[in-house]
Amino acid sequence: MLAVPALAVMDPDSRRQSLTSSCALLLANPVLFFSLVAETNRATLRYGDEVPLDVIALRDRWEFGHLGRFMCHLVAFLALAWQSSRES
């Protein structure tokens, strides 16, 4: 996660766009985690043994957070792989 911003600063302009997009996607990952996954985890801990009425909405929010994080990682990796295969 720290190498991609360093590469974006040090690299020539030809690869800067894919590196910048990969960096943005990797930086969006903690935002998604703390806004969706961690908040849902905190909400479910408050309920204890009782099943809340909005358990389906909480589960969907938790799963969407993990899916969003996976997609950010996947697209960032594909952008880096695509860029490295173009230059070789």
Image (cartoon, rainbow, N blue to C red):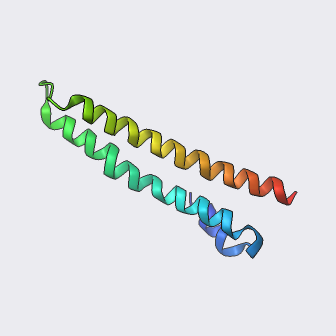
Q: Position of residue 77 (x, y in %)?
A: 64, 49
- Relative side of 9 to 65, left or right: right
Determine the residue positioned at 13% across, 33% down: 47
Q: Is residue 3 left or right of residue 84?
A: left
* Position of 50 relative to 5 (above/below): above
Q: Is residue 38 above or below residue 19?
A: above
> Which image quadrant: the N terminus?
bottom right
Q: Is residue 83 left or right of residue 49?
A: right
Residue at left 53%, top 44%? 71
Q: Is residue 19 left or right of residue 14?
A: left
Which residue, as the protein is rendered here, is positioned at the far right?
88
Q: Quadrant of residue 55?
A: top left
In this orientation, does residue 7 appear? no
Image location of residue 36, percent across then percent down: 33, 46
Q: Residue 68 appears at what percent x and percent y?
A: 46, 45
* Residue 63 place in picture, x, y as percent: 38, 35
Q: Quadrant of residue 87?
A: bottom right
Q: Can I make out residue 47 in this image?
A: yes
Q: Quick one: quadrant of the C terminus?
A: bottom right
Q: Nearer the viewer, residue 53 or 26?
A: 53
The total number of labels drawn is 0
